[in-house]
């Protein structure tokens, strides 16, 4: 994983719980255990500062209010994955963007994809109904809501036949399988003797980093609309098990380093 990706996972998983700020030296020490170079970590910190994710303050980097809001929203996806039941409502998103605003159209499609929506037609997308409020919130923050109308609706009558064309289910399945394969050795290690708090931190950081995008891309469709042997539910269960096992010792290691109690 890149230093930038691991840093974002570290900020969301640990820094908020320790006051929302971290010294550059502590970030270098902690992420160094995960294989990141000092230069890579410092460069990643500078880039997040330039984007407004981090604010430089008294020799430390503090999460900005916008970043905290995004991370809190992310918690609902990463740690509170919500698969759809058969009778749950759906979200329908209709949008119209002038031909002269192609970059806006591209941004809108990217945001809808990241929200877990699938494309029914060029200006018609669908997704889980429980994400409607979040979709409006995100699109408003991105100044895209004025192009969009969002409805809640009953399940589409032809959903079973059309779902494979709305979402890349094969691609999602490959990502779920890759996550399960990558986390298998970590689960085996912690099913036995485990390891040190530092090892727990490294494994937990890799766990969060490998998982955190999947709940955004996978809409959590009802079982009847998924192909046989769908790996998504297994991935959700594995993440929950490992997060519950690794987060406490990982948090203890981070606290020890930041408070000066670890080498």
Image (cartoon, helix red, strand yellow):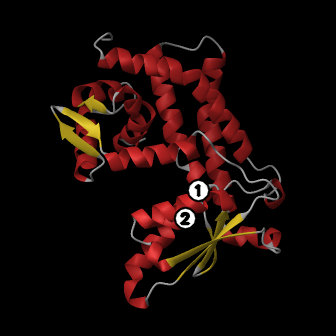
Quadrant of residue 193 within the rendered picture: top right
Q: Nearer the viewer, residue 234 or 192?
A: 234
Question: On the rendered image, what quadrant is the N terminus found in?
Answer: top left
Does the CB distance between marks 1 and 2 fall below 8 Å? yes
Q: Is residue 115 visible in the rendered structure shown here?
A: no
Locate residue 84, reporting x and y percent. 74, 54
Locate residue 70, reporting x and y percent. 43, 49
**Residue wearing tag 2:** 113
The residue sitting at 63% across, 55% down in the picture is: 218
The residue sitting at 73% across, 57% down in the picture is: 221
Locate residue 155, reporting x and y percent. 78, 68
- Crowding at dot 1, Cα within 10 Å, few <14 / some 14-19 / many 20+, comes out as some
Mark closest to the chain's N terminus, 1 or 2? 2
Circle 1 — which element?
A: helix
Disc marking residue 235? none
Give the CA separation, mark 1 to mark 2: 7 Å
Which residue is the extreme one toward the left?
58
Q: Nearer the viewer, residue 172 or 255?
A: 255
Specify whether 126 is left or right of 105.
Answer: right
- Crowding at dot 2, Cα within 10 Å, few <14 / some 14-19 / many 20+, comes out as some
Q: Is residue 85 above or below residue 189?
A: below
**Residue wearing tag 1:** 217
Q: Is residue 86 above or below residue 256?
A: below
The residue sitting at 37% across, 24% down in the picture is: 33
Quadrant of residue 257 within the rendered picture: top left
Q: Is residue 263 above or below residue 74?
A: above
Circle 2 — which element?
A: helix
Locate residue 67, reporting x and y percent. 36, 47
Specify whether 162 is left or right of 249.
Answer: right
């Amino acid at each position: 994983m890149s230093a930038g990706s691991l840093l974002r996972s570290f900020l969301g998983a640990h820094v908020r719980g320790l006051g929302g700020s971290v010294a550059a030296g502590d970030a270098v020490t902690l992420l160094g255990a995960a294989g990141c170079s000092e230069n890579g970590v410092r460069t990643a910190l500078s880039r997040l500062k330039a984007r407004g994710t981090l604010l430089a303050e008294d020799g430390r980097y503090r999460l900005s209010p916008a970043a905290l809001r995004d991370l809190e929203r992310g918690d609902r996806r990463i740690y509170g994955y919500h698969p759809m039941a058969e009778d749950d409502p759906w979200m329908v998103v209709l949008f119209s963007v002038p031909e002269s605003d192609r970059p806006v159209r591209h941004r809108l499609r990217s945001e809808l994809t990241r929200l877990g929506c699938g494309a029914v037609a060029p200006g018609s997308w669908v997704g889980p109904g429980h994400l409607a409020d979040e979709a409006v919130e995100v699109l408003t923050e991105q100044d895209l809501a004025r192009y969009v109308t969002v409805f809640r609706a009953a399940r589409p009558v032809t959903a079973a036949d059309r779902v494979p064309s709305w979402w890349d289910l094969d691609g999602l399945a490959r990502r779920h399988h890759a996550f399960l394969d990558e986390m298998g050795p970590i689960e085996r290690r912690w099913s036995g003797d485990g390891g040190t708090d530092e090892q727990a931190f490294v494994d937990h950081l890799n766990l969060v980093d490998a998982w955190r995008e999947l709940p955004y891309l996978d809409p959590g469709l009802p079982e009847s609309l998924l192909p046989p042997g769908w790996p998504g539910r297994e991935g959700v269960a594995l993440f929950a098990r490992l997060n519950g096992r690794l987060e406490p010792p990982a948090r203890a290691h981070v606290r020890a380093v930041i408070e000066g109690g670890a080498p």
